[in-house]
Every structure is written in structure tokens, then in C-alpha cells.
Image (cartoon, helix red, strand yellow):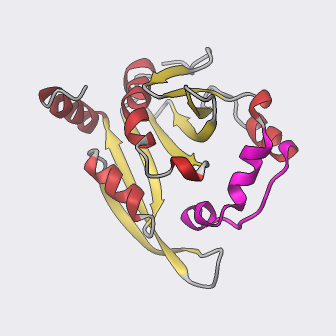
Amino acid sequence: MPPPQQPVRLEAGQYLIRTLTESDASDRWAAWPADPEAAYLLNAPARKLSQSDIITYIGSFDQQSRLLLGIFDQKTGTHVGFLTFSIDFAASRALVNLLIGEPSYRNYGVLTAIRRPMTTYIYETLGLQALLASVLAHNQVILDWLLKEGWILERTLHGEIRSQSGDKMLDVCLLKYPREAWQARERELAEKGKR
């Protein structure tokens, strides 16, 4: 299937997922990388960015094979996080990354709310066969959620990357969510009346 050409706009209950543009660059977004919890979970140096840094970041996505999508609270309009997809159309798969940047929205069901529209877009609209993710092993909340949703832990790379907060080497978990696992999860939720 050819790369998507139209901006993405997905309704997800309380949330809206849409293509990010330069006009979305904000001081609030620029402050997310300075949050110690986010920095720890991402193994990134804690630092505040500028709006110019954010604009440059947005510009690095072609919105065809590299998508940058924002997650917004529909009631307040608050930009709460973002998703990136690095799509390999030839291999029919995409590597997904996610950050819930607003601390007050972490662990409050954002992932559960956006799961179905996001995966439906990947599997039905784009026609891909698999989603991939890499998660630091110490990010137990995300690992548990992914496994509960049907993702498959393919392997754990021990001592794969150096910690940004010391000399410790960190483990990285590689996960896959094939179309078949998504279909099985959709059937399970339909049977429970949760779709």
C-alpha cells in the first residue's frame, strides 16, 4: 500500500489523535523532556527544549513513512503526548514510540483509550501486518500493559544501552504485535462487549 497522503485524524473517546504540525510546537511540549520521570523512562537526558527544537523535530517527519501524531484531550484541547511510527511498507510493519508528556495524564487510561483507533488505523487503513516496539525493561507499567493487550515479547537484550543517569547498562525488551494478535484481541473484547 502506498504511504498515507492525508493528515491523520482519529477519534479516541476523550482523546483525539492527529497529525502534528509546526503550529503545535509549544513551551509546554518543550518542557516535557525536562521532566525527571519521562527522562528516566525514556533513558534520555533531562533537558528543556526550545520551541525551535520542537519545530525542527516536527520537520524531521515526512508524514508518509515517518508519522508524528499528537494526542489531545478533546474537552480541554490540551496536547498530552505523541506517537511516532517508522513504517517499512515493504516489510509491512511499523516501529511505534509513544510519550505521554503531561504528567497528570500518565497512568490514567490514555493508552487504553487510544489503542483501538490507533491499531485499526495501522492494520485496516495502512494494511500493515505488524507493529514493533522496544521498551526499557525498567518501564514495567508499559511492559505490563503491552503484554496484557496481546503484544509478544520476542526477546530481551541484556545490557544493551548505557543509562543516561549513570554507568549502568540497561536491558531493552523487543516486542511485536502481529495482525493476528490484534484480531484475537478485537474478538476477545467484542465477546466481552468492550468494543
Range of magenta residues: 26-51
Horizontal side of 62 relative to 127 (left or right) equals: right
Task: State yes or no: residue 179 in magenta.
Answer: no
Q: Is 107 or 148 nearer to us in this picture?
A: 107
Task: State yes or no: residue 43 in magenta.
Answer: yes
Does residue 42 lie above or below 101 as drawn? below
Looking at the image, the residue that sits furthest to the top is 6
Residue 166, given in percent of the width and then of the height, sits at 64, 83
Looking at the image, the residue that sits furthest to the left is 191
Residue 18: quarter of image: top right
Residue 67, given in percent of the width and then of the height, sits at 61, 32
Q: How many marks?
A: 0
Does residue 170 lie above or below 121 as drawn? below
Where does the C terminus fall, quadrant-wise? top left
Q: Is 110 or 96 nearer to us in this picture?
A: 110
Q: Chief secondary structure of the magenta span? A: helix
Residue 19, given in percent of the width and then of the height, sits at 63, 26
Looking at the image, the residue that sits furthest to the front is 76
Residue drawn where x is 41% and y is 26% of the image: 117
Residue 98, given in percent of the width and then of the height, sits at 53, 46
Residue 194: quarter of image: top left
Residue drawn where x is 74% and y is 45% of the image: 28
Residue drawn where x is 45% and y is 64% of the image: 139
